[in-house]
Image (cartoon, coloured by chain):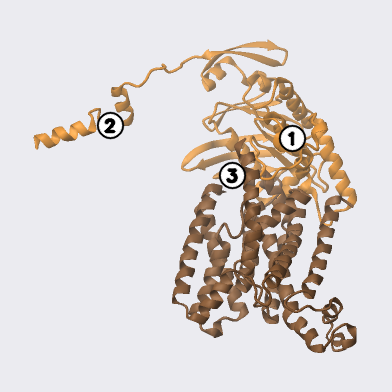
Chain colours: A orange, B brown
Amino acid sequence: MLYTEDLNITLRGRAVLQGITLSVPCGSLVVVIGPNGAGKTTLLRALSGDIRPSSGQVSMAGKPLAQWTLQERAQHRAVLEQDYALSFPLRCLDVVLLGRMPHQGRPRSPDRRLDDLLIARSALDAVELGDRADDSYEFLSGGQKQLVQLARALAQIWEPPVGNNAQRCLLLDEPTASLDLRYQHMILSRAQQLAAEGVAVLAILHDINLAAQYADTLILLKNGTIVAQGSPAHVLTPTLIHDVFGVSASRIDAGERPVILSAAASQLPNNQTLSRKRYAQHANITTEHPVRASQAKGGAA
Amino acid sequence: MKPQRLTLFALLGFCLLTIAVSLRFGAVQVPILCAWSSLWPSAASQPSLGCPDAELARAVLSLRLPRVVLAVCVGSGLGLSGAALQALFRNPLVDPGLIGVSSGAALFAAALMVLGSGVFCSPPLLLFAGFAGGLCAAIAVQRLSQVGGRVLVPALILAGVAVNAVAGALIGLLSYIASDAQLRGLTFWTLGSLGGATWPRVLWAGAVSLLSTILLLRQAGSLHILVLGESAAAHLGVATDSLKRRVLLLSVLLVASAVALCGIVGFVGLIVPHVVRLIVGPDPRRVLPGSALLGVFLLLWADLISRSAVAPAELPLGIVTAALGSPFFVALLLRERKRWAT
């Protein structure tokens, strides 16, 4: 399980996250939503250990993240980010096999190698790209690339790691971004299924309804703080959605999981070019033409 | 056995064959049996083993053999460091010459040769000067091309151009103030040559490249993960910062020892990894050893050409590798151009 307590992160002098306390228990799917720039990706990067917290702590499986070696972390948790560009052309299967690298001890036995291959193939099958295993990753569509990367992350935590600590975590940064409707549901069903197997899963989503449909716990983030946290029915109220996203919304309750109908944004700035006067107020400068102003001064002198 | 691994073993076989051929041919033709038997001093003293006289066997042992060993060290070092740097910078067009490591090493070694008196030109000191120069150049280029922890490739190329220009100008200045005798040595050396192979030099080079080669080959798995990018590599358990430091240091060590001992030999570090990637695929765990082997192969043949083409005189080695390398570089450009256009 992943756990943070009073986490603060300051980047380039700006407080990006403030007082974040949350937990992602094993066996549950936690979804983070919030407007652009709310600090969602920063939160994910803090949980994965990419960014050190300015204060507060992140811990995984009861041990502070700083006490894990990078390799141990990689054996227990996988991360799916948004964009991956390969520097050299690889086959899809080779990309997925990269996910098994943290588990390779020395020396590698032929058995181990075969296991890794089987896991990689199964992971590709799990995202329905089993028949593209030998194709070059370069020539896939954007959505398919994303799926191959998901398969890579799945392969990384395919089985509980050996040893006395068998916890697994999965962090997903907008996994559905470039995918069609069917694949969106497929990815989130996979995430749900992994959670059912005991993996702690945290995903960032933009689609409120997908979040409502799949999340066990929903975390609503705004300006770097947690606004609300709890079950989808508890968090997704029209008032809260209006407060956080500035969008008027109505809600249809269908069993435990609500459906949100959102309308146009309540307040949009007018689509007008700034007048000189307002621009001057904005930028705190004089509206006089600089050259003419100096000429006038010179003339007076 | 996998076909790719078979290719590596085939390459190893070709290298051994080329070594045999290299000992056999040159300014003086040596019967093959004699060339090989000269490796065992006790056997070499017996003319019955194919040697017309013991003098010839001694010549092979003290002149031709160190040259071949030096070619093996330099060839494997250049090929390997090229492959490692390409994986590290995540760019297939990186080459120790392009990013200024070679000319930086050359500058420092040349400065020692011209400014220091003869006493200072011992193999370990030259090696150290070359290493210091290569490291300075590599660090300068990396600093100049890095923004927020990411290496920007256009800036990298431009920084390499800048470092090469500065080093080139200073080497020019050194040759301007050098005496006639120093100038001859300097010119020959900036064009690259294996001619200066003596046993003490070769042993130094051999020790350095053997150690660096072993340490660098151990990084191949981590370099393979780096194909996904730095943050993804960190998520897969690679300490990217220390990996970068280690690979850069070891590559510079290999290149600098090559430059310090036989001058600037261009294009080997660029073309060899490319050819190897065409044969065994992009995985550094195979590309790194493959590049070391193909580097040896290429350099031995280039050296054979350089000492046979105009025998008994010698063509500078750098001219041969450049003549072989530049058409290949153009072909590479034409091929990569299509990929960039899409």
Q: Where does residue B291 sit, x and y in percent of width and height?
A: 73, 58
Q: Nearer the viewer, mark 1 or mark 2?
A: 1
Question: On the image, numbered disc 1 is attached to which residue?
Answer: A148
**The disc numbered 2 marks a residue on which chain?**
A
Q: Please report whichever mark, 1 or 2, sits nearer to the chain's N-terminal start.
A: 1
Q: Which residue is mark 2?
A: A285
Q: Residues within 10 Å of mark 3 (few under 14, many from 20)?
A: some
Q: Position of residue B230 (x, y in %)?
A: 64, 47
First along the sequence among labels 3 and 2: 3
Q: CA distance from mark 1 to mark 3?
A: 26 Å
Secondary structure under tag 1 reads helix
Q: Nearer the viewer, residue B50 or A159?
A: B50
Per the image, label 2 sits on a secondary structure element best described as loop
The picture places residue A180, in percent across and down from the top left corner, at 70, 22
Report whether A232 appears left or right of A56: right
Query: Residue beneath label 3, please?
Result: A51
Q: Chain of mark 1?
A: A
The amino acid type, in three-letter code, at marker 1 is Val
